[in-house]
Image (cartoon, coloured by chain):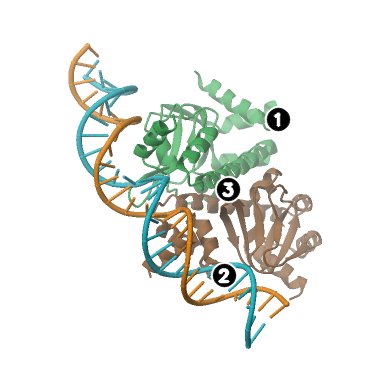
Chain colours: A green, B brown, C orange, D cyan
Amino acid sequence: MTSNEHITLLINHIRKDVSLTESDIEALTKIIEIRELNKKEFLFQPGETSNSMNFIAKGCMRSYYLDENAQEHTLQLGIEEWWINDLYSYLSRKKSRMYVQALESTILVQLPRLKLEQLYLEVPAISHFFRIKIQSAYVAIQERVIDSMSDESYDRYKDFIKSYRDIEQRVPQYIIASYLGVTPEFLSYLRKKHS
Amino acid sequence: MTSNEHITLLINHIRKDVSLTESDIEALTKIIEIRELNKKEFLFQPGETSNSMNFIAKGCMRSYYLDENAQEHTLQLGIEEWWINDLYSYLSRKKSRMYVQALESTILVQLPRLKLEQLYLEVPAISHFFRIKIQSAYVAIQERVIDSMSDESYDRYKDFIKSYRDIEQRVPQYIIASYLGVTPEFLSYLRKKHS
DNA sequence: TTTCTTTCTTAATATACCTTAAGTTTTTCC
DNA sequence: GGAAAAACTTAAGGTATATTAAGAAAGAAA
């Protein structure tokens, strides 16, 4: 697949929410960078600051952090046509506490922050698109807070599958466990018990 | 306290983040509504849609929802100079699942959504201010996700106190328990154990 | 294929947290 | 100020989830 096809995927994705003229597309295309990551490679790590919006054209990514006991906690997962980032770091321009990592060999279409903010002035539709995206990110994370409050861990697992239907098959169980906040052993037990 | 003082509180609050001219303030003041709530009164309830941004001029509020077992889960708390809402409902214009309730007798300075969106066009500083606020709401809720992943509930309690220093004294323990996701009995046990 | 590494499962034991219920303290309101 | 309601504490017994460790299965590498 050529880099053009990845860009087209992004453009069609944006066009689901807002209309773009040919000149909008040209301006957008100018600021795009393509980034390839090998399996297990990091997009960024704690201490770095996120400086781009990252669209997954191919592959699978996750964000996670390590707690004081060096336990991994997965916050976000994504496959083709999802966005992956530490939005906290991107929006606040502070250092991230997150690892953002490729779970498969992955191709990202990146929009660097400074150029994107320039583009907002030129192409309001793009600004509008990202306002929608940041709103949905807020909605998604609030959903996550609510789901995580269910004290039945099997319910949380069902919530997870509802939100991440297509992803469940592609990521290892231990990552799902780290998303749900249970041990892999316990997740294994739950799956057996309910099957 | 007159309603003017409540409005001044809001204006000074906004001026911490952006500059406002006298005419900005005049335009802002025009759309303001004051809402008084008695203790335990609801600002809105599940099934309703949030149609305003709500600044607490006086009092104490919380948002919570009921799970399938009719357990309360507190999502957000606020006192003077905090904003309280179901931002999910406000931004998406969908029905809320939340109760937003006064924990003390409370005075809100409200900005109705439609008028506020008009005001954004007239006074960009206000638009900028709320972009900052919505960003911080995102940051706060991500913080909450991370804090809630600590499986030691006493750690979560310490995180809570760090985020809600001034509020801890003013709300009942059982609400803190419902925020932390533990029973009031267990919170009581924890506080004794660590004191 | 064969070996090595990663991921998944099983099971025994340990612990954090819940449930219930009763008693105590604090707050509300007439 | 006093009665009623709301909130908080204590403790016993129960359940959900963690820990550890070992073996099985699947995937990657050679």
Q: Nearer the viewer, residue A56 or B176?
A: B176
Give how far across and how far down residue A153 sits, in percent. 45, 42
- What's the distance in space between the residues labelled 2 and 1, CA to CA? 49 Å
Give how far across and how far down residue A23 sits, in percent. 68, 28
Look at discs 2 and 3 and give the one toward the viewer. Answer: 3
Q: Nearer the viewer, residue B107 or B186?
A: B186
Residue A110 visible in the picture? no
Give the residue pinned by disc 2. B170
Look at discs 2 and 1 and give the one toward the viewer. Answer: 2
Q: Are marks 2 and 1 on the same chain?
A: no
Residue B67: which numbered mark, if any?
Answer: 3
At mark 3, the secondary structure is loop
B103 relative to B195 in the view: left or right: right
Residue A88: which numbered mark, if any?
Answer: none
At mark 2, the secondary structure is loop
Q: Residue at x 61, y 32 (%)?
A: A28
Up-down: is B81 above or below A112? below
The type of residue carrying mark 3 is Asp
The type of residue carrying mark 2 is Arg
Give the residue pinned by disc 1. A19
Q: How many marks?
A: 3
The type of residue carrying mark 1 is Ser
For label 2, count other residues whose C-alpha is less than 10 Å away and answer few (under 14), some (14-19) or many (20+).
few
